[in-house]
Image: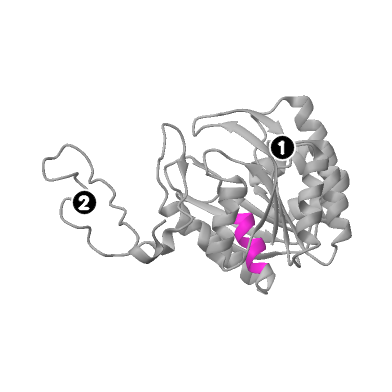
Amino acid sequence: MLVFNACDPVGAGGVSGDALVVASIGAHALPVTTGVYLRDTRETAGWAALPAAAVEEQARMVAEDIPVQTIKVGFLGSAEAVATVAAFTADYAEAPVVTFLPDLSWWEQPEIEAYLDALRDLLLPQTAVLVGNNTTLRHWLLPESATDRRARPTDLARAASALGVSYVLVTGLALDGDRVGNVLASPEAELFSHAYERIEAGFMGAGDILSAALAALLANGSELTHAAAEALQYLDQALDHGFHPGMGRAVADRLFWAETDDEPAPGAADGDAHGDGPHPIHIPSPSNDIQH
């Protein structure tokens, strides 16, 4: 599975996060880096883009060596990179493209407009599934009703279909009670919906997780509706096991399935016997026959 995405130093999203998700699903990620976020858990301060030619060379070399089953597109960082990725995906039209539209509110308005124009004109016509938060997609696809919370996922799917997209996976729909809805929709109907209890924490990287999981499941041969259901269940569990690594937003645990129910060793959680810090990590010496 080929992944176009940014490098995220927080580890919440980007190519490193995608690789964890894809491996968890049982596929192999081919991560193509498009640039580097300048951010921590509190804010995104900027963006350092790679030249579009470097993005293209990464993708061409790996795709000519390894068969590509699906393509996930995350944040590309410039209109030039969008054009490059669109040209690449056109040459590998047999691989379904899952495109994630992240929140770009941290970016300068001229860059946002140029980026979205390139996405709309060049990449969406090749996108099988567009993934995004309800508010983000509504402001982009239905600007005349940007403040209309009654816009349905099928309305978004019809707007996306006019740009060449087959399906949308919409997240963050407000439901009755304290629940959040997520819907896979075509222009004609809602194909699958899933709701879960709202978690009282702001997360980074949730959309990257969902889109990567969906693309990985498709790469493994899952039918679209089943893949959406499994991807949403995976995201729900990852968020439920999330944690706060810093002073800002939370990060999902994409390896939640690897946790065990074993009780920790006595004192493991509370430091050493004297209570003055954690136990040191013990790294055993190699046996004599492999020492250098």
Quadrant in the picture for residue 168: bottom right
| Stretch of the chain drawn in magenta | 210-218
Q: Is residue 46 left or right of residue 116?
A: left
Which quarter shows the N terminus? Answer: bottom right
Q: Is residue 1 above or below residue 130?
A: below
Q: Nearer the viewer, mark 2 or mark 1?
A: 2
Q: Does residue 172 appear in this view?
A: no
Q: Amino acid at mark 2?
A: Ala
Q: Residues within 10 Å of mark 2 (few under 14, many from 20)?
A: few
Which quarter shows the C terminus? Answer: bottom left
Residue at x-position 53% and y-position 51% = 175
Q: Is residue 91 left or right of residue 35?
A: right
Name the chief secondary structure element in magenta.
Answer: helix
Where residue 112 sits: x, y (%)? Answer: 75, 32
Where residue 82 sits: x, y (%)? Answer: 81, 43
Residue at x-position 14% and y-position 40% = 275
Q: Is residue 84 magenta?
A: no
Question: Callout 2: helix, strand or loop?
Answer: loop
Q: Amino acid at mark 1?
A: Ala
Calculate the distance from the C-alpha at mark 2 to the C-alpha at mark 1: 51 Å
Identify residue for label 1.
146
Quadrant in the picture for residue 277: top left
Residue furthest to the left:
274
Where residue 81 sits: x, y (%)? Answer: 80, 41
Q: Nearer the viewer, residue 171 or 93?
A: 93
Residue 268, which numbered label?
Answer: 2
Q: Nearer the viewer, residue 96 or 260?
A: 260
